[in-house]
Amino acid sequence: MSITSGESPVLCVNKMEADLSGFNIDAPRWDQCTFLGRVKHFFNITDPRTVLVPERELDWAKVTVEKSRTMPAVIFWQWVNQSFNALVNYTNRNAASPTSVRQMALSYITATTTAVATAVGMNMLTKRAPPLVGRWVPFAAVAAANCVNIPMMRQQELIQGICVKDGNHNEIGHSRRAAAIGITQVVISRITMAAPGMILLPVIMERLEKLHFMKKVKVLHAPLQVLLSGCFLIFMVPVACGLFPQKCELPVSYLEPELQDAIRAKYGELVPYVYFNKGL
């Protein structure tokens, strides 16, 4: 078989099909319509180091990679992640708003189902995107899931309202508008918390993985990514939680008309602002 700088139309079409169908572990990693791409490909498959690795280990690695990319695997891990998020969102709600077991179960099912569908859908829509865009898919999925998961797990606050108090901590009513503001702030905080690690880290890792040293120690890629992610979170968790005050202040004039009337009827103009706990 001769290897030339030309390429048959069949090989070029196969390459195009590989691009359209996303990652394929059996397809060449480099463009087979270019000389340099073919050289890289054959350097790779003739690498003498592969002789030292048993064939069963290569097959196991291949199957593992393929299984991790299957839709059932994506759905399972998204469900695990969103179940954890649902628990966090529930425990960090405003505890003054009671929730029955039935309401909690319904909220959990709705939140996880909607969030998983959102995340999986975004992964499918961006499957053909450039590699770096593909690395940003998890952030987009996390942001979209937060916009669904948090309101669903705290929907009772949106339905019945959140407890609002005067400056002396006296309860003076429940407000749905206050609940909407508090939940919106929590969603913004959560997205901000994840943003640097999930937007900047893929860029950093892409640069690092191109270094000659990093190519030799691929086993360190995952631990390094976890370490850098932890460093981002150590800084961003307090920053994101501190974006908005825990005890929120809201003008009475912004409350529901009926609640405004009730407050003014009882206190007159003595209570210009109400206060509430937005949760975390």
Image: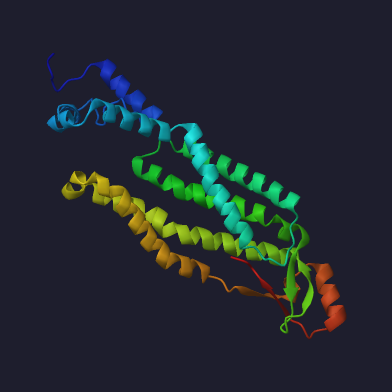
Question: Looking at the figure, which quarter contains the C terminus?
Answer: bottom right
Q: Position of residue 9 (x, y in %)?
A: 26, 16
The number of callouts visible is 0
Q: Quadrant of residue 10?
A: top left
212 lies above or below 252? above
Name which residue lies at 49% across and 32% down: 71
- Residue 11 found in image quarter: top left
Q: Nearer the viewer, residue 272 or 119?
A: 119
Residue sitting farthest toward the top = 1
Residue at x 66% of width, y 44% of height: 109
Q: Nearer the viewer, residue 212 or 216?
A: 216
Whole-percent x, y for residue 96 in the image: 72, 67
Q: Quadrant of residue 259?
A: bottom right
- In the rendered structure, the answer to whether residue 191 lies left or right of residue 216 reads right
Residue 243 sits above or below residue 118 on the image:
below
The answer to whether residue 275 of the structure is visible from this angle is: yes
